[in-house]
Amino acid sequence: MDFLKGLLIRLVTTAFAFWLATLFIPGITLDSDSAVTAITTLVLVAAIFGVVNAVLQPVIKTVGCGFYLLTLGLIALVVNGLLFLLTSWIAGEAGLPFHVDEFWPSAVLGALLVSVVTWVLGTILDRD
C-alpha cells in the first residue's frame, strides 16, 4: 500500500509541476477547453514523463557516464531537456493537447522547473 501511495504522490506532484511549467515557461502549452481535460492531460503527460525517465534515464547515464564526469553533471540539463521534448512528442502522438515548442529555452527550463518542483513537493509530502 505504501508503494501505491508513493506512486500516486509522485504522479500528482509531477502533474502539478507540469501545470506550473505551462504557466511560467514560454513555449510550453496546454490547449484544453475544460479543467477536466487539462487535469487528465497533465496526469497522462506526467505518467508518460515517468515512464520515459524510468526507461531511458538509466541507459543514458550508463552510456554517457564519461560525459557526466567530463561536464561535472551539466550534461544532465541537456539530457533532461531532450527527455522533456520526447515526452512532448509522445503526448502529441497520443493526441494529448500538450506541446513544447523548442529545446532551448522551453524544454530545458521546463525540465529544470519540473525537477525542482517535484523534488521540493516530494520532500514536503514524504513520498518515499
Image (cartoon, helix red, strand yellow):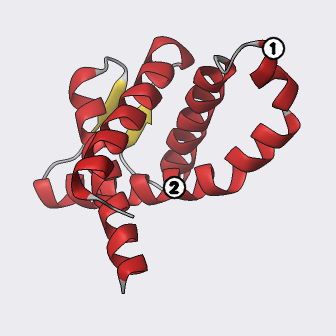
Reply above or below: 30 against 28. Answer: below
Image quarter where the N terminus lies is bottom left
Q: Amino acid at mark 1?
A: Leu
Label drawn at residue 50: 2
Label 2 secondary element: helix
Reply above or below: 96 against 68. Answer: below
Residue at 42%, 36% (x, y): give it.
115
Q: Residues within 10 Å of mark 2 (few under 14, many from 20)?
A: some
Q: Position of residue 36 (x, y in %)?
A: 16, 61
> What's the CA distance linking mark 2 and mark 1?
27 Å
Reply above or below: 98 against 21. Answer: below
Label 1 secondary element: helix
In this view, the residue in front, 98 or 18, is: 18
Please count the marks in the image.
2
In this view, the residue in front, 79 or 58, is: 58
In this view, the residue in front, 89 or 49, is: 49
Q: Amino acid at mark 2?
A: Gly
Q: Position of residue 101 (x, y in %)?
A: 46, 23
Eye-nearest disc, 2 or 1? 1
Image quarter where the C terminus lies is bottom left
Q: Is residue 49 left or right of residue 35?
A: right
Q: Is residue 64 left or right of residue 5?
A: right
Which residue bears the numbered disc 1? 70
Q: Position of residue 22 (x, y in %)?
A: 27, 32
Label drawn at residue 42: none
| Residue sticking out furthest to the left | 35
The numbered mark, 2 or 1, whose residue comes first in the sequence reads 2
Q: Is residue 59 left or right of residue 73?
A: right
Q: Position of residue 67 (x, y in %)?
A: 81, 21
Residue at 36%, 59% (x, y): give it.
10
Picture quadrant of residue 86: top right
Residue at 34%, 44% (x, y): give it.
118
